Amino acid sequence: MNEQHTPFNLDHPFDVDLLRKTLVGRGYVQSALAETMNLDAPEGPLARKSDVYAILRRTEKPSPYNTLVRLFILGRVMPEDAAREALEPVVLEDLLAVGLLRKDGGGVRAEAALLAYEDLYLLCDFLPQVLGGQAPDDFVLGIGPSTIALANMTVRKKARNVLDLGAGAGFQSIRASDHAERITATDINARALNFGALNARLSGRDNIEFVRGSLYEPVRGRTFDLVVCNPPFVISPKGRYQYRDSGMEGDTLCERIIRGAPGLLAEGGFCTVLVNWHHKDENDWAARPLSWLDSSGCDIMLVCSETEDPIAYASSWLARDAAVEQERFPETLDRWLAYYDDLGIGKISFGAVIIRRRTCSRNWVFTDRAPEYRAQGPCSDQILRIFAAQDILQKGLDLLSLRFLLTPDHELMQTLQAEEGIWKVSNARIRQVKGFPFTGNVDKLMATMLAGCNGERTLDELIRDLAAGLRMDPDRIVKPCVEVMGMLMQKGFLTVVQDGGGTTGAGT
């Protein structure tokens, strides 16, 4: 890895276990930082300059925790004695030698922000609104919504080799190291790889290799059980930031990543890529990314979380850029919109492409919209259920002969309406509460049948028992019941119980 212009000395030894224990002991953990930083704010933490002042006020009283927040969240110069006390028994000189801290006047300053997320500590650059000025081209991003979205949509099966393409600060690589033997993390940003290598060290991971290079060049000729990528997907007229803008026309970078992924996957391997892509209107949202995977030898799951018009899209990204001054906003917005006009862009969609390498005569495609997918937690089990269901449906198996199990990760929502003095159900929807928040309409008959999906009886038996209870001819309800069950399978509400007692789509 090229360490030119990189801040951290990776060769200097220091006790990372002691540093983690000290941070936890001082209360520098996610729950405390969430309260101090007001992570629940709609705009996100530190979105405005006023948020910095608020945190300064909350950390006025001298204490080890407040010193750490001012050092590692706000980037303030702290008296050396206060920093030494906050970090004790960690040797301050070790952190200076590694480059985590540096001398500044009569005190010390952190080289980078240090975030706490679950059981991890992750170094990244301070946000521009924290230190003032604008972000450099090689800015190293921390943990944002897209970071969590990709982590949630990664299939967590045991793997030998994993590729984290565009690894940045290394979060995805570190998460993958929990279920993989070896991870290769690549990026064109040498500074980001330097951050990532130190983050892996802070997390106690020694099975991650950090390699500098563009796209798939550093791993040409290799195959992987899992590929993950959170690329610089923003469609913009100028490649200003390496972490955000591709510098290529339109969605060309996302297209190249998607087209190249199948060739790197081992048989049965999965790939998840976050994507922004453009198209003409609301009706053709799936056509463009699907065209990138024609004859790919992969099963395809395309999920669209949001579609915006060019004005909303450009305004949203420009509002987050501290380098765009308020008086220059209209001029910059006009330049972005002219760029979209030149490319004939009518709409821009956000989402994810999830593929699995599977050699067969015909691969399947599943597309859907899943608003607010970021807030629903890990999707791995649900994704595996969806892929297993699509396999079953493609084989044309008789659903009536199968035994189904309804996943507990759902809720049934009923709308009641007063009629003739009593409440009657006017509408009922089933919704998944973990993973993609897929929904489906169910009537009273289907709700009753789903309640019986405990893996013990076949669908045919469930339908006949239900029809007998309602004194109906079972043949009248077979077709609609099979159609609804197929739809619910496709969206991960159901698993099929196999003869040995296991279920389809179980992660390993």
Image (cartoon, rainbow, N blue to C red):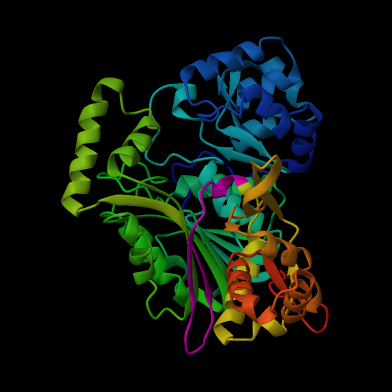
Q: Residue at image x 41%, y 62%?
A: 215
Asked whether, in this view, residue 97 is left or right of residue 311, the answer is right
Front position in the image: 398 or 111:
398
Query: Is residue 407 highlighted in magenta?
Result: no
Position of residue 351 measured from the top left corner of the image (x, y, whole percent): 46, 55
Position of residue 406 measured from the top left corner of the image (x, y, whole percent): 74, 65
Position of residue 161 measured from the top left corner of the image (x, y, whole percent): 61, 70
Asked whether, in this view, residue 157 is left or right of residue 223, the answer is right
For the C terminus, the image quarter is bottom right
Q: Residue at image x 54%, y 46%?
A: 372
Asked whether, in this view, residue 437 is left or right of residue 468, the answer is left
Q: Residue furthest front?
A: 420
Residue 266 lies in what quarter of the image?
A: bottom right
Residue 84 lies in what quarter of the image?
A: top right
User: Which residues lie in the magenta part?
Assistant: 353-375
Query: Is residue 361 highlighted in magenta?
Result: yes
